[in-house]
Amino acid sequence: MDGLAQPAPLVDLVRAFAAGAAAHDRAGSFPHENFALLREAGLPGLTVPRRWGGEEAGLARCTAVIGTLAGGCPATALVLAMQLIQLRTLLADPAWPEALRARLAREAVEEGALFNALRVEPELGTPARGGLPATILRRSPEGWRLSGRKIYSTGAPALRWMLVWARTDEASPRTGLALVEAGTPGLRIEESWNQAGLRASGSHDVMFEEVALPLAQAPDLRPPADWARPDAAVAAWNTLPIAALYTGVARAARDWLVWFLRDRVPGSLGAPLATLPRMQEAVGRIEALLLANDRIIASAAAAQDAGEGPSAAESGLIKTLAAENAIQVVQEAVALCGNHALARANPLERHLRDVLCARIHTPQPDAAHTLAGRLALGLA
């Protein structure tokens, strides 16, 4: 490798992402430059099997990467998390043609092609709550025609491939994912994303108007009830990277707080705020919450890699616990800093808006707690 550029280590990526995070947040713009750096570092193909040139990384490695990168730009980390999760799942599914899986794998490894699943709809909300999608697959002479609208399509400006949750128009509908390449005629992105948090994630609406697809790009269509069966491995992969991501946001807030307490010297005190026992105790509580998150996420991810991972219900609880701990960390940091924390120029204000998005990801707290409660009561 002498004379060739080496991939940037994670710490350099975090610094680069952090340098532009505030500007992208203010503008609601997508950080394309971050994904150029991720491609140079070889991270989009992290979960691709070795036989197709990937690292075949396990869940422990992926959660560590996502948690670290989130400290620089959580929106970028979220798009990468979706990439690693969705690509791993698709490439492991024998229902998809081998040649197509090989192509997708190599595009991710060699070109950094980005993937995500588009599931949420205006009327349906998240499919995790039940119901059939309004997005329709109709048979045509060339294969399928896809029509519908998806919202909250994370990473939309940079995706090469979209896995679209849809149903057939048959008398007894089947549901499944249809693979659509960006730029296909009939596909249109509406730049609608204007939320309080994760503003740089490009989670826009995507419209599909009679998009033509070959049969091979929607090969796994099943009766809806077949998808309701819990898959513990899928649940772990869908939840633990999200838990790590928002823990990364909380850690960034903690780091800024520590700097502030060491640097701030009120005239009435004549010493840094860090010398006050009250501040030391508060930072200790923050350390405890971060430690709990780090330990529970790392332990569950390592167990999953060893084939002894958490149940689907346990994964939901881990994500919920980690999310609430992360939110508490940032809220505590804001409370300690007072008005300083709520200034738009202060990173804590952005971290607070970002970390509150943790509750929105599936499973949401009420669903995770209800499932765990039903299991404990012998009702599920």
Image (cartoon, rainbow, N blue to C red):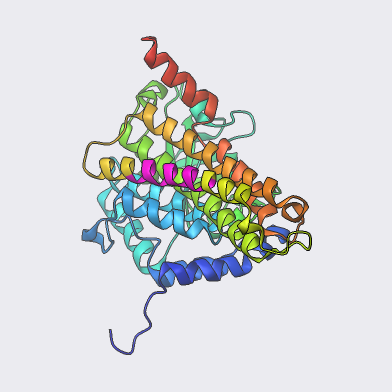
Q: From this viewpoint, which residue is outermost toward the bottom?
A: 3
Quarter of the image with the C terminus is top left
Looking at this view, is 108 or 217 the one in front?
108
Q: Is residue 313 visible?
A: yes
In which quarter of the view is residue 144 placed? top left
> Within the magenta stretch, is there residue 146?
no
Taking the spot 49% from the left edge, 28% from the top edge, the residue there is: 128
- Could you tell whether 345 is left or right of 77 in the image? right
Quarter of the image with the N terminus is bottom left
Whole-percent x, y for residue 234 in the image: 35, 37
Taking the spot 39% from the left edge, 33% from the top edge, the residue there is: 315
- Could you tell whether 290 is left or right of 303 in the image? right
Main structural element of the magenta stretch: helix, strand or loop?
A: helix
Q: Is residue 132 visible?
A: no
Whole-percent x, y for residue 279 in the image: 62, 50
Taking the spot 48% from the left edge, 23% from the top edge, the residue there is: 369
- Could you tell whether 75 is left or right of 42 in the image? right
Q: Can you say whether 150 is above or below 199 in the image?
A: above
Whole-percent x, y for residue 237 in the image: 37, 42
In which quarter of the view is residue 376 placed? top left
Whole-percent x, y for residue 30 in the image: 62, 61
Looking at this view, is 306 or 165 the one in front?
306
- Could you tell whether 194 is left or right of 253 in the image? right
